Image (cartoon, helix red, strand yellow):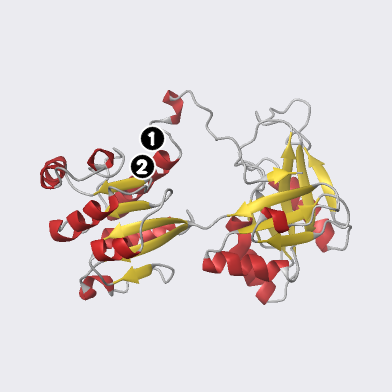
Amino acid sequence: MLREVWPFVEDHHRAGRPLVLARLVSRDGPGSRPLGATLALAADGTWRGSLSGGCVEGIALDAAQTVLDGATPHLATICPTEHLLPWEAAPACTGNLGVLITPAPGQPVHDAITDALAHDHPLWVRVGLQPPYPWSAATTPDELPDSDGPAFIEHLPRRRRLILIGATDLAATLAHLAEPLHRAVTVIDPRPAHLHSGAFPHTTTLIEEWPDTWLTQHPLHAGDALIALSHDPRIDDRALRAALPGPATHIAALGSRATHAQRLHRLTGTPGLDRLIGPAGLDLGATTTAETALSILAELTATENGRSGRRLRDGHHPIHPQPPLASLRR
């Protein structure tokens, strides 16, 4: 997706280096990456992103290099078996991939994408699938042009909010791990010494306030998640009482089973208490702070995707969900 490679695109754009994007816009078979998956190649030879599990990246990079060298942008058909000899084993995803090879968008689309991602504004980005492969962007799909033939449209939504209660070392690790998951992380703690430890990434919003006060002024929405981490009932309980009656998708609290049993007793009668997840996290046998953070984020991901969190080998559902309806061709 554009969000995944855009920091790389922006860095090279500021340095004045040309870039070419290879974007997955169609597929007639199974694959490990959704439509909209993007690979970005810069003029200095560095690149980011992927179109598959790794079986077509070399082909896509070769095609992107030709456009960097002056070849005409084009819509290519790439097959994972293209470079295999007849007797070599092919990957399971052997369908043809429609890959648009085109320079990264110029102004004003480039700035529109950069601004939307920096300030969490939703944006719709359209690229035509016929020469000259024009780019456009708008805050609603209705504002996009539709008069120049088929196009691939990607929705860049606001990041989902992750509210962490308690500015602990675990919260800082969670904030760092949540960055590549494209979460908008807010940490709330009334204790200034905890909040201003310097351990949090600069992208984290730090709120020095009692959590129930802040949550009353900034209600959670569907898609948001809240995790209580302070281990101080005076802080965590106030956050949970404020959050549980609302529509947040995931509400969890750190602690042992005994701690959680005591928490449930204290919160008896709170609307939505049956939605509270505790102890937070999947059973990974975590001991370090990083392992615990991984366990908590893995459970959050499974909850949001409606999955059990068990081993893939023991499941029956497709490993990859259907492509999001926000990415489409027309």
Residue 223 in sight: yes
* Neighbourhood count class around disc 2 (C-alpha, 10 Å): few under 14, some 14–19, many 20 upward: many
Q: Is residue 171 left or right of residue 41?
A: left
Q: Which mark is residue 299?
A: 2
Residue 168 in sight: no
234 vs 200: above or below: above
Whichever of callouts 2 and 1 sits on the residue coming sooner in the sequence is 2
Residue 39: x %, y % from top left: 68, 53
Q: What element does badge 1 sit on? A: loop
Q: Is residue 24 left or right of residue 212?
A: right
Q: What element does badge 2 sit on? A: helix
Q: Amino acid at mark 1?
A: Gly
* Neighbourhood count class around disc 1 (C-alpha, 10 Å): few under 14, some 14–19, many 20 upward: some
The residue sitting at 30% across, 61% down in the picture is 215
72 vs 106: above or below: above
Residue 285: x %, y % from top left: 26, 40
The residue sitting at 18% across, 54% down in the picture is 237
* Inter-mark Cα distance, 2 to 1: 7 Å
The residue sitting at 65% across, 57% down in the picture is 140
Residue 238: x %, y % from top left: 19, 57
Identify residue for label 1. Answer: 309
Which of the 4 quarters of the picture holds residue 313? top left
Q: Amino acid at mark 2?
A: Glu
Q: Which mark is residue 168?
A: none
Between 234 and 10, the residue placed more toward the observer is 234
53 vs 233: above or below: above
Tell me whether the residue at label 2 lies in contact with that at label 1, contact meaning CB atoms closer than 8 angstroms: yes
